[in-house]
Amino acid sequence: MEELILDIGRWLVSGLQGLGLSAAWADLVLLLVQWGCIVGIVTANVIVLIWLERKVSGFIQQRLGPNRLGPYGVFQTVADAMKLMTKEDIIPSGADRTLFVLAPMLFIIVAVMLYVVLPMGRDMAIVDLNVGLFYFISVGSLSTICLLMAGWGSHNKWSLLGAMRSVAQMVSYEIPLAFSLLGVVMIVGSLNLGDIVAAQQRVWFVLLQPVAFVVFFVAATAELNRGPFDMPEAEQELTAGAFTEYTGMRWALFFLAEYTNLVAVSALASTLFLGGWQGPLLPSWLWIIVKTYLVMLVFMWLRWTFPRIRMDHLMSLSWKVLIPVSLANIVVTGAGLELFRAMGW
Amino acid sequence: MTLTLHDATFALLALLTLGAALGVVLARNIVHSAFLLVLTFLGVAGLFLTLDAGFLGLVQVLVYGGAISVLVVFAVMLLMSEQAGQTNPPGASRFTRWAGGVGAVALALALGAAVCTTAWEPGSGPRPEAVAELARLMLGDYVVPFEAAAVLLLLAVVGAIILAKGEDGR
């Protein structure tokens, strides 16, 4: 089981070379197939995730959630997806058409680009980049631009306000997010996600870096624009923020991208803090899926438990609490590392 | 000389960068110019990546693509008052247009001449890991200028806050 997926890859490469393709081209095809598979699985998985989110919210709010279509309402999101695909594509007459059309496409492209470096099992990162973690952070920061495009392109004050809010929020929370990861990077001495997983052979980093884990989790919730930090889409005040004017598949692309980001960040959390693909009995690629799903359930739990906080509280939480705490964590980690090194540990 | 995959990537990225840069100048709507500028930054980041300078390329994406560009777009949006379609008009007089064109061509020629006359020596031996090397330089050999720059930036941030709050800020 462990080697199943790697074997499929090897079989594909040898098959392509048998057809007369050079090794470099076969590897390129393999790269595209790997990426296509992960993107396909992750986006199709969104259908499950939305159903799960609605069921979890129903459970927490003591209602049933979707329950009409299929057992436990499992086909509800399939029906919703069908509806979204057949809806009329409306572009407001005052909109900046180019930006309006491009924004959702770029948003989902940025979201799926994150998966390139995530190790989804032993030796199963698509590209084993030596600065993988940094790649994840910097590519993730691009999604702010897409939200700005959507907010501006819609030519609607709620859209623009929502976009401004989410950009302010994401720019502020990127800092504690990156700082919280530095503790882990200092312990491992590498930005390669594979090395970080390998370093957790004996002890998970959530135990060595509990403060960093909490800061990362809070900052990631804000970065994903999820409740209790979903100010940018605060339905009661801004209708739907940057997405107000979007309908049908264009809106669905935003939704898809948000959940794709959720999976990516959860997978990153389990890679950095929860031992990644390491675990007993089950094959490595199953372990990362299990851990990712558990992290996602915690995100959902938080979203439906806490009320939304005010915008200024949100900003002061980032600048006055999370950033100092993550900076202190870096100093303490550095001092601890030197201390252990001095003791010859 | 045959065309390799590397050359094709370079050509695509160069076209993208130059096209986007031209778009920044030619677009009539200044918001479009700002977003095209982001694309230019990303194109340059791609060029860094093709040169095996992964870390620099990602810094380019994070700092220019994710942060500076947001600042540019924000400033443009907040200061814009006219009709969006005419916010980035071409140069007012014929003279400025010609002067700009001639200046750009002269700069391109000068840079091209510099590139052609320099004797490029391909590095030999194994390359040191870029991140570790950068860290050693910034936090070792050049730690004083690095810290001085950090203090300067901190002062700028404090100054900006004071300016934004007003003199008698609460």
Image (cartoon, coloured by chain):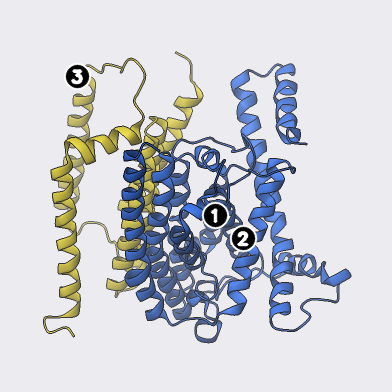
- Work out how far the residue at label 2 is from the one at label 1, CA to CA, in angstroms: 8 Å
In the figure, A62 relative to A143: above or below?
Answer: below
Q: In this view, does B135 lie to the left or right of A274?
A: left
In the figure, B35 relative to A117: above or below?
Answer: below
Same chain for marks 2 and 3?
Answer: no
- Residue B117 badge: 3
The residue identified by callout 2 is A295
- Work out how far the residue at label 3 is from the one at label 1, CA to CA, in angstroms: 51 Å
Residue type of the residue flagged with mark 3: Thr
Q: Chain B is drawn in which colour?
A: yellow
Give the quadrant of residue B164. bottom left
Residue type of the residue flagged with mark 1: Ala
Chain with blue colouring: A
Chain letter of disc 1 in the image: A
The residue identified by callout 1 is A269
x and y percent of residue A232 in the render?
48, 74
Give the position of the N terminus of chain A as an image quadrant: top right
